[in-house]
Image (cartoon, helix red, strand yellow):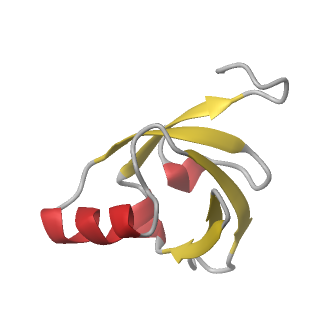
C-alpha cells in the first residue's frame, strides 16, 4: 500500500520510497525513512496534499509524492496488518 491510500487517523510503517534521488533526500531530511512510523492526519479537498505526522514533525505531502511512499499499515491494536 502507498501513503496516498492510508486513511486519516491510521498509523503505518514506511517500507520504501521509490522516487528520484533529489526528492528522496528531501523526504529523508523531513524524517521519511524506512522503518519510521507515520500517521495520516487529514486529506485536503480536491486531490490536495496530505497532512502527515512522523515522530513530532508534521508535514504536508503532495499526493503524487505520497503515491511513491510505500507502507505497512498497523492495525488498531498495534500489530502489523
For this view, does 71 lie left or right of residue 45?
left
For this view, does 75 lie left or right of residue 67?
right
Tell me what residue is drawn at x 55 percent, y 38 percent: 13
Tell me what residue is drawn at x 65 percent, y 21 percent: 80
For this view, does 33 lie left or right of residue 42?
left
Q: Quadrant of residue 42?
A: bottom right
Any part of residue 33 in sight: yes
Residue 66: image location, x then y, percent = 45, 60
Q: How many marks?
A: 0
* Front-most of residues 16 and 66: 16
Any part of residue 50 in sight: no
* Front-most of residues 7 and 21: 21
Residue 65: image location, x then y, percent = 38, 65
Taking 3 as reference, is 1 above or below it?
above
Residue 17: image location, x then y, percent = 32, 49
Q: Quadrant of the C terminus?
A: top right
Tell me what residue is drawn at x 46 percent, y 74 percent: 62
Return the residue found at the far left. Answer: 21
For this view, does 11 lie left or right of residue 64?
right
* Front-most of residues 20 and 54: 54
Tell me what residue is drawn at x 35 percent, y 53 percent: 68
Amino acid at each position: 500500500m502507498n501513503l496516498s491510500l492510508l486513511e486519516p487517523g491510521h498509523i503505518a510503517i514506511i517500507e520504501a520510497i521509490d522516487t528520484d534521488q533529489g526528492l528522496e533526500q528531501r523526504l529523508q531530511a523531513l524524517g521519511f525513512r524506512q522503518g519510521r512510523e507515520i500517521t495520516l492526519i487529514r486529506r485536503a479537498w480536491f486531490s490536495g496534499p496530505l497532512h502527515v505526522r512522523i515522530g513530532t514533525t508534521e508535514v504536508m505531502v503532495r499526493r503524487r509524492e505520497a503515491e511513491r511512499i510505500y507502507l505497512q499499515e498497523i492495525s488498531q491494536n498495534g500489530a502489523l496488518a
